[in-house]
Structure formats: C-alpha cells, structure tokens
Image (cartoon, rainbow, N blue to C red):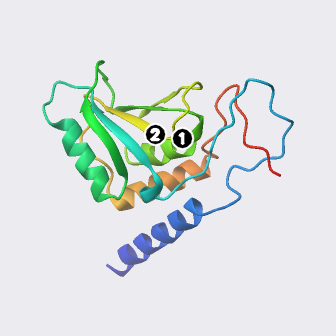
Amino acid sequence: MIASILLILTLTVTTYALLNDSQRGRAVGAQCPAGWPTVDLTFKQNDELKVKVWNATDRPGLADAVATDFTHRTVRVLAEGNAKIAVDGVALLRYGPAAVGDAHVIGAYFLNTAEMGYEATRTDDVVDVLVGNEFKQLATQTEFSVSIAELAAAGQPTLPPRSCEPSKT
C-alpha cells in the first residue's frame, strides 16, 4: 500500500517537473531555412490544450464520450462530431507546428499508441483527435504520467521534418 502511494507520488512529481521544464526541447542550431515553419515542442498543462474530437468509427456517441473524458481532465474541447474517414487504430492525431508538443501530451492519453499526423501547413494550435476502432478508453492519471515520462526519456517530441524551433532572442 505504502509502495503504491510512493509510486503515484513519484510519478506525479516527475510528470509535473517534465511538463514545466522551461528548457525542454531546447537545442542550439542553425538559422531556420526560408519557408520552414517554427514549431512548439512544449509539453503544456491540460487546461492549455485544445482539441476537437471526431468519431472515426461506426460506434454511436464515441466522440461525445471521449470529449467528456477530456473535459473531466480539464482539456478544452472545441468541437466534436463524426469524422469523414475511418481509423482502424486507437486514434489519429492531426496537428500543426503550433501544437507539436500538445499532440504528444494528448497522445499520452492514448498510451503513446495514437498515429501522429503532422500537417506543416496548419496555422492553429488545436489537435484533432480522430478516435479509431481499437480505442477502449483514455489512460488513467497514473498511466498518463508513465506515458509522459516515457516520452521524455525517449527525447520526445522531436522536430518534425523540415521544421525549426523558434529563435531564441
């Protein structure tokens, strides 16, 4: 019992430290080539995340259920409905340069099994969540904390192809 409590406390503190690391993803690099977008690799807190949830299955009410679960986790849900495509896996996350870190945080709620769909031309900071046929449920807080820790240990998120970090002035 005590070991379980200590494990949960450790995971919570580790997650908090990783999410609030102001130097996360920082690297000294050359100037960004013309036309390449700058991306945000920051792991934000749930109340700073914005999602649109789409049901990419034939299960009625799935988008509403997942949107409600995200709302209970203080993630801002901007829209929900049915997708125009089917997703066979757990989920497909679509996002642009302003939401690279956000997409990885949302992906942790799918135990890092969601397909990542980076779209370099997007200009918003919203993650589209297309919930797929293999989806069962969002991760618990403990599972989420472990998933975030695994991402950080693996050096994620990394820069998508043909993109740059914002200049540090």
Q: Going by the image, does 3 lie left or right of 21?
A: left
Q: Quadrant of residue 2?
A: bottom left
Q: Residue at x 43, y 77 (%)?
A: 6
Find residue 95 and report its horizontal and vertical position in percent. Answer: 49, 33
Label 2 secondary element? loop
Q: Could you tell me if the residues under marks 2 and 1 are in contact, i.e. CB atoms within 8 Å? A: yes
Q: Going by the image, does 18 lie left or right of 144?
A: right
Find residue 71 and report its horizontal and vertical position in percent. Answer: 29, 54
Q: Quadrant of residue 134?
A: top left
User: What label sits on residue 6 in the rendered view?
Assistant: none
State the CA–CA distance, disc 2 to disc 1: 6 Å
Mark 1, residue position: 99
Comparing 147 with 169, the one in front is 169
Amino acid type shown at disc 2:
Val
Q: Residue at x 85, y 35 (%)?
A: 31
Comparing 107 with 124, the one in front is 124
Above or below, 4 against 117 in this view is below
Find residue 9 and report its horizontal and vertical position in percent. Answer: 44, 74
Mark 2, residue position: 126
Comparing 6 with 132, the one in front is 132
